[in-house]
Amino acid sequence: MELEIRRDYYLKQLINRKNNGLIKIVTGIRRCGKSFLLRTLFKKHLLENGVDESHIIEMAFDLFDFIDYREPKTFYAWAKEQMKDDEIYYFLLDEVQLLDEFVSILNGLTDKKNCDVYVTGSNAKFLSKDIATEFGGRGDEVHMYPLSFSEFMTVYEGNRYDGWNEYITYGGIPMVVLAETEEQKMDMLEQLLKETYIRDIVLRNKIRNVGEMEMLLDVLSSAIGSLTNPNKLKNTFKSVNRSKITATTITKYIEYLEDSFLIEAVNRYDIKGKSYIGTPMKYYFMDMGLRNSRINFRQMEVTHSMENVIYNELRMRGFRVDVGNLFIVEPGKDSKTVKKQLEVDFICNKGSKKYYIQSAYMMGTGEKMTQEIRPFLKINDSFKKIVVTSDTPKPFYSEAGILFMNIYDFLLDPDSMER
């Protein structure tokens, strides 16, 4: 029997959106499990809750059996034929970008009172960040990520320490996680990058100089969690590769990588000034395995990898995330004041909730602790402040009210930030 990875967080989101009159659009990086969520897990939920199988209408447009249905009139006529009474029909449509005129057709189906429509798409054309807007306000997006660490551990046969090492090395793409050997995982990641993600980006955006775009991906892979901007990257290209690439072209390439959900850009926020700073920004990869494959599994700094994983976890939990900047004035030499800039790794917002988080791989000495909490002590508000480490035995609060916890407790407990 094939191993089944539970994706309860996303399944719940689909269940909560049932019959809401909108087109449910499951987006996310390719191969993160969208099809499995829709046509296995969600279908199973419908059947277990009394929906007759004849009222679940499925189609995978990427299969040869259904190639004729990519023609709009053919599909629409077939879809109407399936509805034989006034009960709710659930349409589960996979790889819907292959259906011509799919926006008009899906809007047409949603107009019918007994249609509830769910779709996925797995190429860069469909996965544009703004796809939901194409449906004229009728799109309801569920954004899906590769496996979180807690999802990964449900199928990993070993302790959480070994699991962590595996996770930050090979990432959370389900098919990679389920591969049996390290060699298979590395080969899969390399093929996915080359034949799936990069190929899609190049075809969709008609990129001529593929080598330049791939070099940019290499640079970003080597610099996760570092502040950068197109001008800085342009100078790197010029000095290292003697390239004449412009900042404008680099900006476009970064947008393409973001649109395909390979990377996410994070803005800087002035905590005291309560305003966004703009460039430079930080970039994080949606999957550590893809990032590591791009740099041939070199540069495996656990500090940056842990920071990237924490960022992804916060996004999976539905937070908006920024990098925090704090400008302070302190006494310097000769009684002169010195202006300094402190950084908070992440400011997380969701509704009325707000958290400040520092990622500190090894806490070790008291001096290191002082360094990590220093920005927190300068923030004059009552929102929760958390330091995530790899070497804190159990969660505890410092005298200043700062919560310390280890990376395992943080990732494996969905309510870890509420402790």
Image (cartoon, rainbow, N blue to C red):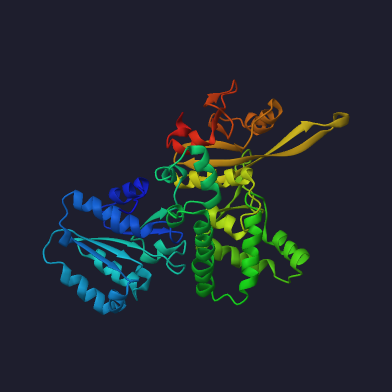
Q: Is residue 317 above or below residue 63?
A: above
Please state the total of marks drawn on the protein image: 0
- Tell me if 285 is positioned left or right of 368 in this view: left
Residue 53 at what x, y percent from top left?
17, 59
- Tell me if 283 is positioned left or right of 11 in this view: right
Identity of the residue drawn at 65% across and 66% down: 215
Q: Is residue 357 above or below residue 133?
A: above
Q: Quadrant of residue 54?
A: bottom left
Identity of the residue drawn at 73% across and 70% down: 243
Residue 155 at what x, y percent from top left?
40, 45
Which residue extends farthest right? Answer: 334
- Tell me if 242 is positioned left or right of 139 in this view: right
Which residue extends farthest left? Answer: 85
Identity of the residue drawn at 46% across and 64% down: 128
Please state which of residues 80 and 4 is positioned toward the viewer in this rendering: 4
Identity of the residue drawn at 53% across and 36% down: 407
Residue 363 at what x, y percent from top left?
64, 31
- Tell me if 322 is positioned left or right of 26 in this view: right
Residue 116 at what x, y percent from top left?
24, 59
Can residue 354 be seen here? The reply is no
Can residue 68 be seen here? The reply is yes
Please state which of residues 257 and 132 is positioned toward the viewer in this rendering: 257
Q: Is residue 250 above or below residue 272?
A: below
